[in-house]
Image: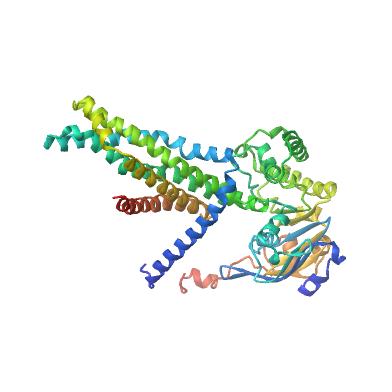
Amino acid sequence: MTNNASAQAAPAAPAGDVVVAVRDVHYAAGGRPIFAGLDLAVRRGRITAIMGPSGTGKTTLLRLITAQIRPERGTVQVFGRDLAALGRAQTYELRRRTGMLFQNGALLTDLDVFENVAFPVREHTDLPEPLIRLLVLTKLQAVGLRGAAQLMPGELSGGMARRVALARAIVMDPEILLYDEPFVGLDPISLGVILRLIKHMNEALGITSVVVSHDVQELATIADDSYLISAGRVAAAGTPAQLRASNSAAVRQFMTGSADGPVPFHYPAPDYATQLLGTEPA
Amino acid sequence: MINPRPGSYLLGGIRRLGAVTVFFVRLLLRCVPSLSRPRLLIMQVYNAGARSLIIIMLAGLFVGMVLGLQGYDLLQRFGSEEALGTAAALGLLRELAPVITALLFAGRAGTALASEIGLMRATDQLTAMEIMAVDPLGYVAAPRFLGGVIAMPLLTAIFSMIGLFGAQLVGVQLMRVDRGVFWSQTQGSVDLHDVSEGMVKSVVFGIACSLIAVYEGYHAEPTAAGVGLATTRTVVASSVIVLLFDYVLTAAFL
Protein backbone atom coordinates (compact mmCIF):
# COMPACT_ATOMS: atom_id res chain seq x y z
CA MET A 1 0.00 0.00 0.00
CA THR A 2 2.96 2.29 0.34
CA ASN A 3 4.88 1.99 -2.86
CA ASN A 4 4.03 3.02 -6.36
CA ALA A 5 3.58 -0.46 -7.74
CA SER A 6 0.83 -1.32 -5.29
CA ALA A 7 -0.84 2.02 -5.96
CA GLN A 8 -1.40 1.09 -9.58
CA ALA A 9 -3.05 -2.14 -8.62
CA ALA A 10 -5.11 -0.90 -5.68
CA PRO A 11 -8.57 0.08 -6.93
CA ALA A 12 -9.17 -2.74 -9.32
CA ALA A 13 -12.07 -2.13 -11.69
CA PRO A 14 -13.28 -3.23 -15.11
CA ALA A 15 -11.57 -1.15 -17.80
CA GLY A 16 -14.79 0.43 -19.06
CA ASP A 17 -15.53 1.64 -15.59
CA VAL A 18 -12.59 4.03 -15.43
CA VAL A 19 -13.62 7.58 -16.34
CA VAL A 20 -10.32 9.33 -15.78
CA ALA A 21 -7.07 7.48 -16.28
CA VAL A 22 -3.76 9.15 -15.54
CA ARG A 23 -0.78 7.08 -16.67
CA ASP A 24 2.89 7.69 -15.96
CA VAL A 25 2.45 11.46 -16.06
CA HIS A 26 5.52 13.67 -15.79
CA TYR A 27 5.10 17.39 -15.42
CA ALA A 28 7.35 20.24 -14.33
CA ALA A 29 6.54 23.90 -13.77
CA GLY A 30 9.24 26.54 -13.74
CA GLY A 31 11.99 23.93 -13.65
CA ARG A 32 10.51 22.29 -10.55
CA PRO A 33 9.27 18.75 -11.15
CA ILE A 34 5.70 18.34 -9.90
CA PHE A 35 4.78 14.90 -11.16
CA ALA A 36 7.26 12.13 -11.85
CA GLY A 37 5.35 9.07 -12.96
CA LEU A 38 1.89 9.68 -11.57
CA ASP A 39 -0.65 6.88 -12.04
CA LEU A 40 -4.23 6.97 -10.93
CA ALA A 41 -7.73 6.04 -12.01
CA VAL A 42 -11.11 7.53 -11.22
CA ARG A 43 -14.02 5.12 -11.41
CA ARG A 44 -17.53 5.94 -12.54
CA GLY A 45 -20.06 6.88 -9.90
CA ARG A 46 -17.59 7.05 -7.05
CA ILE A 47 -16.07 9.80 -4.95
CA THR A 48 -12.32 9.78 -5.39
CA ALA A 49 -10.24 11.79 -2.96
CA ILE A 50 -6.88 13.14 -4.02
CA MET A 51 -4.93 14.09 -0.92
CA GLY A 52 -1.47 15.37 -0.26
CA PRO A 53 0.47 18.08 1.53
CA SER A 54 0.30 21.63 0.13
CA GLY A 55 2.38 22.11 -2.99
CA THR A 56 2.19 18.53 -4.21
CA GLY A 57 0.42 19.58 -7.37
CA LYS A 58 -3.15 18.59 -6.53
CA THR A 59 -4.54 21.59 -8.39
CA THR A 60 -2.12 20.90 -11.24
CA LEU A 61 -3.68 17.46 -11.51
CA LEU A 62 -7.11 19.03 -12.06
CA ARG A 63 -5.63 21.28 -14.72
CA LEU A 64 -4.26 18.19 -16.44
CA ILE A 65 -7.64 16.45 -16.30
CA THR A 66 -9.40 19.50 -17.77
CA ALA A 67 -6.78 19.78 -20.54
CA GLN A 68 -5.64 23.24 -19.50
CA ILE A 69 -2.08 21.95 -19.50
CA ARG A 70 -0.47 18.93 -21.09
CA PRO A 71 1.87 16.43 -19.47
CA GLU A 72 5.45 16.29 -20.65
CA ARG A 73 5.29 12.53 -20.64
CA GLY A 74 2.53 10.03 -20.09
CA THR A 75 -1.15 10.21 -20.94
CA VAL A 76 -4.35 11.54 -19.41
CA GLN A 77 -7.53 9.87 -20.62
CA VAL A 78 -11.00 11.18 -19.89
CA PHE A 79 -14.00 9.13 -21.00
CA GLY A 80 -11.50 6.85 -22.70
CA ARG A 81 -10.09 9.57 -24.94
CA ASP A 82 -6.51 10.74 -24.84
CA LEU A 83 -6.57 14.48 -24.10
CA ALA A 84 -3.33 15.12 -26.00
CA ALA A 85 -4.96 13.92 -29.22
CA LEU A 86 -7.95 16.26 -29.00
CA GLY A 87 -8.36 19.48 -30.93
CA ARG A 88 -9.85 22.61 -29.47
CA ALA A 89 -13.44 21.81 -30.46
CA GLN A 90 -13.21 18.28 -29.07
CA THR A 91 -11.65 19.56 -25.86
CA TYR A 92 -14.58 21.95 -25.43
CA GLU A 93 -16.97 19.10 -26.20
CA LEU A 94 -15.37 17.06 -23.42
CA ARG A 95 -15.41 19.97 -20.98
CA ARG A 96 -19.17 20.28 -21.39
CA ARG A 97 -19.42 16.86 -19.76
CA THR A 98 -17.22 18.05 -16.90
CA GLY A 99 -18.01 20.42 -14.07
CA MET A 100 -15.48 22.05 -11.81
CA LEU A 101 -15.78 23.79 -8.49
CA PHE A 102 -13.05 26.36 -7.92
CA GLN A 103 -11.52 27.12 -4.57
CA ASN A 104 -12.94 30.65 -4.46
CA GLY A 105 -16.03 29.89 -6.53
CA ALA A 106 -14.82 31.93 -9.53
CA LEU A 107 -18.30 33.41 -10.02
CA LEU A 108 -18.57 36.05 -12.72
CA THR A 109 -18.59 39.26 -10.74
CA ASP A 110 -20.73 41.29 -13.13
CA LEU A 111 -23.64 38.83 -13.09
CA ASP A 112 -26.00 38.07 -10.21
CA VAL A 113 -26.41 34.59 -8.72
CA PHE A 114 -29.23 33.61 -11.06
CA GLU A 115 -27.36 34.73 -14.17
CA ASN A 116 -24.18 33.04 -12.99
CA VAL A 117 -25.96 29.69 -12.79
CA ALA A 118 -27.76 30.39 -16.08
CA PHE A 119 -24.49 31.34 -17.80
CA PRO A 120 -23.47 27.91 -19.19
CA VAL A 121 -27.07 27.19 -20.24
CA ARG A 122 -27.36 30.45 -22.15
CA GLU A 123 -23.99 29.91 -23.78
CA HIS A 124 -24.56 26.34 -24.88
CA THR A 125 -28.28 25.98 -25.53
CA ASP A 126 -31.17 27.89 -27.06
CA LEU A 127 -33.63 26.94 -24.36
CA PRO A 128 -36.57 29.30 -23.91
CA GLU A 129 -36.44 31.65 -20.95
CA PRO A 130 -39.09 29.88 -18.80
CA LEU A 131 -37.17 26.61 -19.10
CA ILE A 132 -33.87 28.29 -18.15
CA ARG A 133 -35.61 29.80 -15.14
CA LEU A 134 -36.91 26.42 -14.10
CA LEU A 135 -33.53 24.78 -14.53
CA VAL A 136 -31.64 27.45 -12.61
CA LEU A 137 -34.15 27.55 -9.76
CA THR A 138 -34.03 23.75 -9.36
CA LYS A 139 -30.24 23.80 -9.16
CA LEU A 140 -30.27 26.70 -6.71
CA GLN A 141 -32.84 24.82 -4.64
CA ALA A 142 -30.51 21.81 -4.59
CA VAL A 143 -27.79 23.89 -2.95
CA GLY A 144 -30.32 25.69 -0.73
CA LEU A 145 -29.83 29.15 -2.22
CA ARG A 146 -32.99 29.71 -4.26
CA GLY A 147 -33.65 32.73 -2.05
CA ALA A 148 -30.31 34.28 -2.95
CA ALA A 149 -30.96 34.31 -6.70
CA GLN A 150 -30.94 38.08 -6.99
CA LEU A 151 -27.78 38.71 -4.93
CA MET A 152 -24.51 39.75 -6.54
CA PRO A 153 -21.40 37.58 -5.93
CA GLY A 154 -19.89 40.34 -3.78
CA GLU A 155 -22.77 40.00 -1.33
CA LEU A 156 -22.19 36.29 -0.68
CA SER A 157 -20.17 34.68 2.07
CA GLY A 158 -17.38 32.28 1.10
CA GLY A 159 -19.52 29.21 1.74
CA MET A 160 -22.49 30.63 -0.18
CA ALA A 161 -20.28 31.57 -3.15
CA ARG A 162 -19.01 28.01 -3.26
CA ARG A 163 -22.56 26.64 -3.20
CA VAL A 164 -23.60 28.95 -6.06
CA ALA A 165 -20.53 27.80 -7.97
CA LEU A 166 -21.62 24.22 -7.29
CA ALA A 167 -25.08 24.96 -8.69
CA ARG A 168 -23.41 26.44 -11.77
CA ALA A 169 -21.11 23.42 -12.09
CA ILE A 170 -24.07 20.99 -12.15
CA VAL A 171 -26.48 23.04 -14.24
CA MET A 172 -25.41 21.31 -17.46
CA ASP A 173 -25.68 17.88 -15.77
CA PRO A 174 -22.00 16.91 -16.01
CA GLU A 175 -20.84 13.34 -15.69
CA ILE A 176 -17.75 14.28 -13.70
CA LEU A 177 -17.46 16.94 -11.06
CA LEU A 178 -14.04 18.16 -9.98
CA TYR A 179 -13.69 19.88 -6.63
CA ASP A 180 -10.59 22.00 -5.99
CA GLU A 181 -10.02 22.33 -2.23
CA PRO A 182 -13.74 22.66 -1.44
CA PHE A 183 -13.24 22.91 2.34
CA VAL A 184 -10.61 25.63 2.58
CA GLY A 185 -11.56 28.59 4.73
CA LEU A 186 -15.08 27.45 5.61
CA ASP A 187 -16.72 27.64 9.02
CA PRO A 188 -17.85 24.27 10.46
CA ILE A 189 -21.46 24.73 9.36
CA SER A 190 -20.63 25.67 5.76
CA LEU A 191 -18.11 22.85 5.70
CA GLY A 192 -20.77 20.39 6.77
CA VAL A 193 -23.11 21.74 4.09
CA ILE A 194 -20.52 21.36 1.34
CA LEU A 195 -19.62 17.89 2.54
CA ARG A 196 -23.27 16.86 2.45
CA LEU A 197 -23.73 18.40 -1.00
CA ILE A 198 -20.76 16.53 -2.46
CA LYS A 199 -22.18 13.27 -1.14
CA HIS A 200 -25.66 14.20 -2.37
CA MET A 201 -24.51 15.13 -5.88
CA ASN A 202 -22.76 11.81 -6.07
CA GLU A 203 -25.61 9.68 -4.73
CA ALA A 204 -28.66 11.44 -6.15
CA LEU A 205 -27.29 12.47 -9.52
CA GLY A 206 -24.73 9.69 -9.95
CA ILE A 207 -21.99 12.18 -10.71
CA THR A 208 -18.46 10.85 -10.58
CA SER A 209 -16.59 13.11 -8.19
CA VAL A 210 -12.94 13.95 -7.79
CA VAL A 211 -12.19 15.88 -4.63
CA VAL A 212 -8.77 17.45 -4.23
CA SER A 213 -8.05 18.46 -0.67
CA HIS A 214 -5.75 18.16 2.29
CA ASP A 215 -8.58 18.05 4.78
CA VAL A 216 -8.13 14.39 5.52
CA GLN A 217 -10.74 13.96 8.26
CA GLU A 218 -13.53 15.53 6.20
CA LEU A 219 -12.65 13.60 3.06
CA ALA A 220 -12.43 10.29 4.84
CA THR A 221 -16.12 10.49 5.73
CA ILE A 222 -17.31 10.65 2.11
CA ALA A 223 -14.60 9.22 -0.14
CA ASP A 224 -14.92 5.80 -1.74
CA ASP A 225 -11.38 5.70 -3.08
CA SER A 226 -8.45 7.83 -2.07
CA TYR A 227 -5.00 8.59 -3.30
CA LEU A 228 -2.21 10.16 -1.32
CA ILE A 229 0.19 12.08 -3.54
CA SER A 230 3.68 12.86 -2.39
CA ALA A 231 6.89 13.75 -4.20
CA GLY A 232 5.25 13.63 -7.61
CA ARG A 233 3.74 10.17 -7.41
CA VAL A 234 1.07 8.21 -5.64
CA ALA A 235 2.41 7.36 -2.19
CA ALA A 236 -0.60 5.31 -1.17
CA ALA A 237 -4.01 4.35 -2.49
CA GLY A 238 -7.07 2.58 -1.15
CA THR A 239 -10.09 3.36 0.98
CA PRO A 240 -9.57 6.00 3.68
CA ALA A 241 -9.64 3.28 6.32
CA GLN A 242 -6.91 1.38 4.52
CA LEU A 243 -4.76 4.48 4.38
CA ARG A 244 -5.14 5.13 8.06
CA ALA A 245 -4.13 1.57 8.83
CA SER A 246 -1.09 1.91 6.61
CA ASN A 247 2.19 0.68 8.03
CA SER A 248 4.11 3.50 6.35
CA ALA A 249 5.11 6.20 8.80
CA ALA A 250 4.81 8.91 6.14
CA VAL A 251 1.23 7.97 5.25
CA ARG A 252 0.25 7.75 8.91
CA GLN A 253 1.80 11.14 9.66
CA PHE A 254 -0.28 12.74 6.95
CA MET A 255 -3.50 10.93 7.85
CA THR A 256 -3.23 11.78 11.54
CA GLY A 257 -1.68 15.20 11.11
CA SER A 258 1.35 14.83 13.39
CA ALA A 259 3.67 17.84 13.37
CA ASP A 260 6.82 15.78 13.17
CA GLY A 261 7.61 12.55 11.41
CA PRO A 262 9.16 11.60 8.11
CA VAL A 263 8.09 15.09 6.97
CA PRO A 264 10.19 17.12 9.43
CA PHE A 265 8.79 20.07 11.37
CA HIS A 266 11.99 22.04 10.75
CA TYR A 267 13.04 23.41 7.41
CA PRO A 268 16.68 22.36 6.82
CA ALA A 269 18.96 24.77 8.77
CA PRO A 270 22.40 24.87 10.32
CA ASP A 271 22.74 23.60 13.86
CA TYR A 272 20.55 25.65 16.22
CA ALA A 273 23.08 26.16 19.02
CA THR A 274 25.92 26.99 16.66
CA GLN A 275 23.82 29.58 14.84
CA LEU A 276 22.50 31.21 18.04
CA LEU A 277 26.01 31.55 19.47
CA GLY A 278 27.01 33.38 16.32
CA THR A 279 29.86 31.18 15.18
CA GLU A 280 27.94 30.34 12.03
CA PRO A 281 26.84 33.03 9.54
CA ALA A 282 23.08 33.64 9.74
CA MET B 1 21.49 45.77 -11.07
CA ILE B 2 23.02 46.05 -14.53
CA ASN B 3 21.79 43.45 -16.96
CA PRO B 4 24.79 41.38 -18.05
CA ARG B 5 23.09 40.68 -21.39
CA PRO B 6 21.82 43.95 -22.85
CA GLY B 7 20.58 42.11 -25.94
CA SER B 8 17.98 40.34 -23.84
CA TYR B 9 15.95 43.56 -23.60
CA LEU B 10 15.76 43.71 -27.39
CA LEU B 11 14.87 40.04 -27.67
CA GLY B 12 12.26 40.41 -24.95
CA GLY B 13 10.76 43.38 -26.78
CA ILE B 14 10.57 41.50 -30.07
CA ARG B 15 9.05 38.47 -28.37
CA ARG B 16 6.43 40.70 -26.76
CA LEU B 17 5.62 42.37 -30.06
CA GLY B 18 5.14 38.93 -31.58
CA ALA B 19 2.91 37.83 -28.71
CA VAL B 20 0.77 40.97 -29.04
CA THR B 21 0.44 40.41 -32.78
CA VAL B 22 -0.66 36.79 -32.35
CA PHE B 23 -3.12 37.90 -29.67
CA PHE B 24 -4.44 40.62 -32.00
CA VAL B 25 -5.12 38.14 -34.80
CA ARG B 26 -6.85 35.70 -32.42
CA LEU B 27 -8.89 38.59 -31.05
CA LEU B 28 -9.93 39.76 -34.53
CA LEU B 29 -11.12 36.25 -35.38
CA ARG B 30 -13.41 36.37 -32.32
CA CYS B 31 -14.73 39.85 -33.14
CA VAL B 32 -17.13 38.78 -35.87
CA PRO B 33 -18.98 36.22 -33.71
CA SER B 34 -19.10 38.73 -30.86
CA LEU B 35 -21.12 41.06 -33.08
CA SER B 36 -23.92 38.55 -32.64
CA ARG B 37 -24.07 39.46 -28.94
CA PRO B 38 -25.20 43.07 -29.26
CA ARG B 39 -26.07 43.29 -25.57
CA LEU B 40 -22.50 42.58 -24.46
CA LEU B 41 -21.12 44.96 -27.06
CA ILE B 42 -23.45 47.83 -26.17
CA MET B 43 -22.56 47.35 -22.51
CA GLN B 44 -18.88 47.75 -23.39
CA VAL B 45 -19.42 50.80 -25.60
CA TYR B 46 -21.23 52.27 -22.61
CA ASN B 47 -18.39 51.32 -20.23
CA ALA B 48 -15.60 52.66 -22.41
CA GLY B 49 -17.51 55.53 -23.99
CA ALA B 50 -20.31 56.94 -21.87
CA ARG B 51 -18.34 56.57 -18.67
CA SER B 52 -15.45 58.57 -20.15
CA LEU B 53 -17.73 61.38 -21.33
CA ILE B 54 -17.31 63.76 -18.42
CA ILE B 55 -13.52 63.76 -18.45
CA ILE B 56 -13.46 64.05 -22.26
CA MET B 57 -15.92 66.96 -22.26
CA LEU B 58 -14.15 68.83 -19.48
CA ALA B 59 -10.76 68.34 -21.13
CA GLY B 60 -12.20 69.38 -24.50
CA LEU B 61 -13.64 72.57 -23.06
CA PHE B 62 -10.41 73.65 -21.39
CA VAL B 63 -8.17 72.66 -24.29
CA GLY B 64 -10.44 74.67 -26.60
CA MET B 65 -10.38 77.67 -24.27
CA VAL B 66 -6.60 77.62 -24.01
CA LEU B 67 -6.40 77.29 -27.77
CA GLY B 68 -8.65 80.34 -28.10
CA LEU B 69 -6.52 82.36 -25.72
CA GLN B 70 -3.12 81.36 -27.09
CA GLY B 71 -4.32 81.50 -30.68
CA TYR B 72 -5.75 84.96 -30.20
CA ASP B 73 -2.58 86.23 -28.57
CA LEU B 74 -0.43 84.84 -31.37
CA LEU B 75 -2.66 85.87 -34.27
CA GLN B 76 -3.32 89.42 -33.11
CA ARG B 77 0.43 90.10 -33.26
CA PHE B 78 0.08 89.72 -37.03
CA GLY B 79 -3.25 91.48 -37.07
CA SER B 80 -5.02 88.38 -38.25
CA GLU B 81 -7.12 87.44 -35.24
CA GLU B 82 -10.05 86.62 -37.53
CA ALA B 83 -8.12 83.45 -38.50
CA LEU B 84 -8.70 82.16 -34.95
CA GLY B 85 -11.58 79.95 -36.05
CA THR B 86 -9.43 78.25 -38.67
CA ALA B 87 -6.53 77.72 -36.30
CA ALA B 88 -8.68 76.31 -33.55
CA ALA B 89 -10.75 74.05 -35.80
CA LEU B 90 -7.79 72.59 -37.68
CA GLY B 91 -5.71 72.19 -34.55
CA LEU B 92 -8.54 70.39 -32.79
CA LEU B 93 -9.84 68.22 -35.59
CA ARG B 94 -6.52 67.04 -36.93
CA GLU B 95 -4.33 66.87 -33.87
CA LEU B 96 -5.52 67.77 -30.41
CA ALA B 97 -8.85 65.95 -30.30
CA PRO B 98 -7.64 62.50 -31.39
CA VAL B 99 -4.41 62.62 -29.38
CA ILE B 100 -5.74 64.02 -26.13
CA THR B 101 -8.87 61.86 -26.31
CA ALA B 102 -6.66 58.80 -26.79
CA LEU B 103 -4.40 59.73 -23.86
CA LEU B 104 -7.40 60.33 -21.60
CA PHE B 105 -9.04 57.15 -22.88
CA ALA B 106 -5.92 55.17 -21.95
CA GLY B 107 -6.02 56.67 -18.47
CA ARG B 108 -9.73 56.28 -17.90
CA ALA B 109 -11.10 53.38 -19.95
CA GLY B 110 -7.83 51.54 -20.66
CA THR B 111 -6.89 51.15 -17.02
CA ALA B 112 -10.44 50.12 -16.14
CA LEU B 113 -10.35 47.44 -18.86
CA ALA B 114 -6.92 46.13 -17.90
CA SER B 115 -7.68 45.92 -14.20
CA GLU B 116 -11.12 44.39 -14.76
CA ILE B 117 -9.80 41.64 -17.01
CA GLY B 118 -6.73 41.19 -14.79
CA LEU B 119 -8.95 40.71 -11.76
CA MET B 120 -11.09 38.23 -13.67
CA ARG B 121 -7.89 36.33 -14.38
CA ALA B 122 -6.74 36.56 -10.75
CA THR B 123 -10.08 35.28 -9.43
CA ASP B 124 -10.17 32.33 -11.85
CA GLN B 125 -13.18 33.70 -13.74
CA LEU B 126 -11.43 33.30 -17.09
CA THR B 127 -10.35 29.75 -16.23
CA ALA B 128 -13.87 28.96 -15.07
CA MET B 129 -15.18 30.03 -18.49
CA GLU B 130 -12.60 27.82 -20.17
CA ILE B 131 -13.80 24.87 -18.08
CA MET B 132 -17.41 25.69 -18.94
CA ALA B 133 -16.35 25.45 -22.60
CA VAL B 134 -16.92 29.18 -23.13
CA ASP B 135 -14.06 30.95 -24.87
CA PRO B 136 -13.06 33.90 -22.65
CA LEU B 137 -11.39 35.55 -25.61
CA GLY B 138 -14.76 35.69 -27.35
CA TYR B 139 -16.90 36.43 -24.31
CA VAL B 140 -14.67 38.83 -22.36
CA ALA B 141 -11.91 40.19 -24.58
CA ALA B 142 -13.56 40.69 -27.98
CA PRO B 143 -16.59 42.78 -26.85
CA ARG B 144 -14.35 44.98 -24.69
CA PHE B 145 -11.92 45.49 -27.53
CA LEU B 146 -14.68 46.33 -30.01
CA GLY B 147 -16.38 48.57 -27.47
CA GLY B 148 -13.20 50.61 -27.14
CA VAL B 149 -12.70 50.79 -30.91
CA ILE B 150 -16.26 52.07 -31.40
CA ALA B 151 -16.15 54.49 -28.47
CA MET B 152 -12.91 56.26 -29.42
CA PRO B 153 -14.07 58.05 -32.63
CA LEU B 154 -17.31 59.05 -30.90
CA LEU B 155 -15.40 60.53 -27.98
CA THR B 156 -13.00 62.27 -30.37
CA ALA B 157 -15.90 63.87 -32.25
CA ILE B 158 -17.40 65.11 -28.99
CA PHE B 159 -14.00 66.43 -27.88
CA SER B 160 -13.64 68.38 -31.17
CA MET B 161 -17.09 69.86 -30.85
CA ILE B 162 -16.75 70.95 -27.25
CA GLY B 163 -13.21 72.20 -27.95
CA LEU B 164 -14.42 74.39 -30.76
CA PHE B 165 -17.13 75.72 -28.50
CA GLY B 166 -14.47 76.53 -25.89
CA ALA B 167 -12.29 78.33 -28.44
CA GLN B 168 -15.31 80.31 -29.56
CA LEU B 169 -16.17 81.11 -25.97
CA VAL B 170 -12.81 82.76 -25.36
CA GLY B 171 -12.22 84.18 -28.84
CA VAL B 172 -15.66 85.58 -29.56
CA GLN B 173 -17.22 86.20 -26.17
CA LEU B 174 -14.10 87.30 -24.30
CA MET B 175 -11.67 88.63 -26.90
CA ARG B 176 -14.33 90.10 -29.15
CA VAL B 177 -13.38 88.44 -32.44
CA ASP B 178 -16.33 88.93 -34.76
CA ARG B 179 -18.70 85.99 -34.46
CA GLY B 180 -19.56 85.87 -38.16
CA VAL B 181 -15.93 86.01 -39.20
CA PHE B 182 -14.99 83.29 -36.70
CA TRP B 183 -17.54 80.80 -38.01
CA SER B 184 -17.25 81.65 -41.70
CA GLN B 185 -13.45 81.30 -41.52
CA THR B 186 -13.91 77.97 -39.79
CA GLN B 187 -16.43 76.76 -42.32
CA GLY B 188 -14.33 77.93 -45.26
CA SER B 189 -11.07 76.34 -44.23
CA VAL B 190 -12.11 72.97 -42.85
CA ASP B 191 -12.76 70.32 -45.47
CA LEU B 192 -13.52 66.64 -45.38
CA HIS B 193 -9.82 65.77 -45.56
CA ASP B 194 -9.21 67.40 -42.16
CA VAL B 195 -12.16 65.67 -40.56
CA SER B 196 -11.16 62.31 -41.94
CA GLU B 197 -7.56 62.74 -40.77
CA GLY B 198 -8.84 63.12 -37.23
CA MET B 199 -11.24 60.23 -37.58
CA VAL B 200 -8.65 57.86 -39.06
CA LYS B 201 -6.31 58.76 -36.22
CA SER B 202 -8.99 58.15 -33.62
CA VAL B 203 -9.86 54.73 -35.06
CA VAL B 204 -6.18 53.71 -35.11
CA PHE B 205 -5.70 55.00 -31.56
CA GLY B 206 -8.88 53.19 -30.51
CA ILE B 207 -7.54 49.91 -31.86
CA ALA B 208 -4.11 50.45 -30.27
CA CYS B 209 -5.36 51.55 -26.83
CA SER B 210 -8.05 48.86 -26.58
CA LEU B 211 -5.68 46.15 -27.77
CA ILE B 212 -3.01 47.12 -25.25
CA ALA B 213 -5.52 47.31 -22.38
CA VAL B 214 -7.14 43.97 -23.21
CA TYR B 215 -3.78 42.27 -23.81
CA GLU B 216 -2.24 43.52 -20.57
CA GLY B 217 -5.31 42.58 -18.54
CA TYR B 218 -5.60 39.17 -20.17
CA HIS B 219 -1.96 38.36 -19.49
CA ALA B 220 -1.69 39.91 -16.04
CA GLU B 221 0.00 37.90 -13.30
CA PRO B 222 -2.89 36.60 -11.17
CA THR B 223 -1.86 38.61 -8.12
CA ALA B 224 -2.62 42.07 -6.72
CA ALA B 225 0.80 43.29 -7.81
CA GLY B 226 0.36 41.73 -11.24
CA VAL B 227 -2.94 43.52 -11.86
CA GLY B 228 -1.38 46.81 -10.73
CA LEU B 229 1.54 46.29 -13.06
CA ALA B 230 -0.79 45.51 -15.97
CA THR B 231 -2.65 48.77 -15.35
CA THR B 232 0.54 50.81 -15.28
CA ARG B 233 1.87 49.18 -18.41
CA THR B 234 -1.40 49.89 -20.18
CA VAL B 235 -1.08 53.63 -19.60
CA VAL B 236 2.63 53.79 -20.42
CA ALA B 237 2.45 51.66 -23.56
CA SER B 238 -0.75 53.33 -24.83
CA SER B 239 0.67 56.84 -24.39
CA VAL B 240 3.91 56.08 -26.19
CA ILE B 241 2.17 54.21 -29.02
CA VAL B 242 -0.40 56.97 -29.49
CA LEU B 243 2.24 59.69 -29.79
CA LEU B 244 4.36 57.55 -32.10
CA PHE B 245 1.44 56.64 -34.37
CA ASP B 246 0.34 60.27 -34.33
CA TYR B 247 3.58 61.33 -35.96
CA VAL B 248 3.44 58.53 -38.52
CA LEU B 249 -0.18 59.26 -39.44
CA THR B 250 0.36 63.02 -39.61
CA ALA B 251 3.29 62.47 -41.96
CA ALA B 252 1.16 60.15 -44.08
CA PHE B 253 -1.70 62.64 -44.34
CA LEU B 254 0.35 65.71 -45.23
Between residues B43 and A245, which one lies in front from this camera angle? B43
Question: Image check: A196 left or right of A64?
Answer: right
Between residues B21 and B199, which one lies in front from this camera angle? B199
- Against B168, residue A32 (above or below) is below
Question: Residue at horizontal 65%, vertical 43%?
Answer: A158
> Residue B198 placed where, x, y %?
35, 43
> Residue A55 placed where, x, y %?
63, 62
* Residue B155 occupies quadrant: top left
- Against A45, residue A196 (above or below) is above
* Residue A15 occupies quadrant: bottom right
Question: Image check: A160 left or right of B80?
Answer: right
Rendered-image quadrant of the N terminus of chain A: bottom right
Between residues B106 and A57, which one lies in front from this camera angle? B106
Between residues A243 and B191, which one lies in front from this camera angle? B191
Question: Residue at horizontal 18%, vertical 25%?
Answer: B176
Question: Total marks drawn?
Answer: 0
- Against A87, residue B212 (above or below) is above
> Residue A135 placed where, x, y %?
76, 38
Is residue B116 among what the camera can see? Answer: yes
Is residue B66 among what the camera can see? Answer: no
- Against A8, residue A117 (above or below) is above
> Residue A43 placed where, x, y %?
82, 60
Question: Image check: B235 left or right of A243?
Answer: left
